Image (cartoon, rainbow, N blue to C red):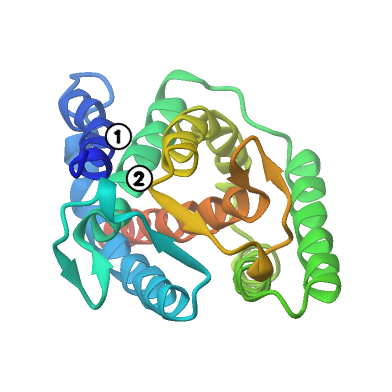
Amino acid sequence: MKYTYLIINILTVIFPVILSFDKRVQFCKSWKYLWPGMAITGFVFLFWDVLFTKQGVWSFNDQYITGFKLFDLPVEEILFFLTVPFACVFIYCCLNYYIKWRLSNKASKLISYFILILSGVLLLLFHNRLYTVVTFGLLLFFMLVLVGVTKSKWLNQFYIAYVVSLVPFYLVNGFLTSIPVVLYNDHQNTGLRIGTIPFEDHFYSMTLLLMNIAFFEYFKNRKKLSE
């Protein structure tokens, strides 16, 4: 069905949009901090997406997309960089409101160092695989900035939100890769999959969320400082 990818996008975002007006979390009041970061991050990832599509890292099954394209990308793929970050930042904010428990600084640092080491090792082992190199190269760069330069304290909450976000991640990416809507060229990745989902997708998602939440926290804190 040509509306499959579009429907997946709508289902991804519909409940977070509706629940944004909940009187307790009131996520709708934080939208103004979300849009700038989504625009910046979306630009980076769409550039990456166009490049990967042209290089044959992945492609899209015409049976499950409407056929409308921009820069050779299905419009549904462009919407993906709006719907998924919106839903995940919503999860992040809800967890911050309802769950007061946080990872300790020590635990957060250990996770961060593990990600840094893993990224470095995979870059060395799979230096000739474009999807692997770009995914872990960007992740390594952003983690170095967040851990070594800005020393972002919100990583304690981020790692919890990321684990929770894996539930919708497996649902959405599971559908996209099992139908399949998105087809991957395994010559450009490690070839490892969890179910039908490429291993790299987990860290592609992590980088996407890191960027969006980093900008969200930046714009929110800048507003507080100006008051």
Q: Residue 86 at what x, y percent from top left?
A: 30, 44
Relative vertical location of residue 7 with respect to residue 212 in this rendering, above or below: above
Depth check: 22 or 153 in front?
22
Secondary-structure class at tag 2: helix
Q: Which label belongs to residue 119?
A: none
Residue count near mark 1 (Cα–Cα under 10 Å), binned few <14, some 14–19, many ≥20:
many
Q: Residues within 10 Å of mark 2 (few under 14, many from 20)?
A: many
**The disc labelled 1 sits on which kind of residue?**
Thr
Residue at horizontal 35 percent and vertical 71 percent from the top: 46
Q: Amino acid at mark 2?
A: Val
Vertical placement of residue 23 versus 113, above or below? above
State the SS at label 1. helix
Residue drawn at 32 percent across, 73 percent down: 43
Q: Does 144 sit left or right of 78 as displayed? A: right
Left/right placement of residue 63 relative to residue 170 reads left
Q: Say which residue label 1 marks.
A: 12
- As rendered, which of 222 and 140 lies closer to the eye? 140
Q: Is residue 9 visible?
A: yes
Q: Position of residue 199 (x, y in %)?
A: 67, 50
Q: 111 or 201: nearer the eye?
A: 201
Give coordinates of residue 176: x percent, y percent. 42, 42
Figure quadrant of residue 26: top left
Q: Residue at x 48, y 43 (%)?
A: 177
Residue 158's x, y, as percent? 56, 42
Give whichever of discs 1 and 2 has the lower sequence position.
1
Q: Check the picture and name the quadrant holding the N terminus.
A: top left
Q: Is residue 194 left or right of residue 221?
A: right
Residue annotated with mark 2? 84
| Callout 1–callout 2 Cβ contact below 8 Å | yes
Label count reads: 2
Residue located at (86% from left, 67% from top): 121
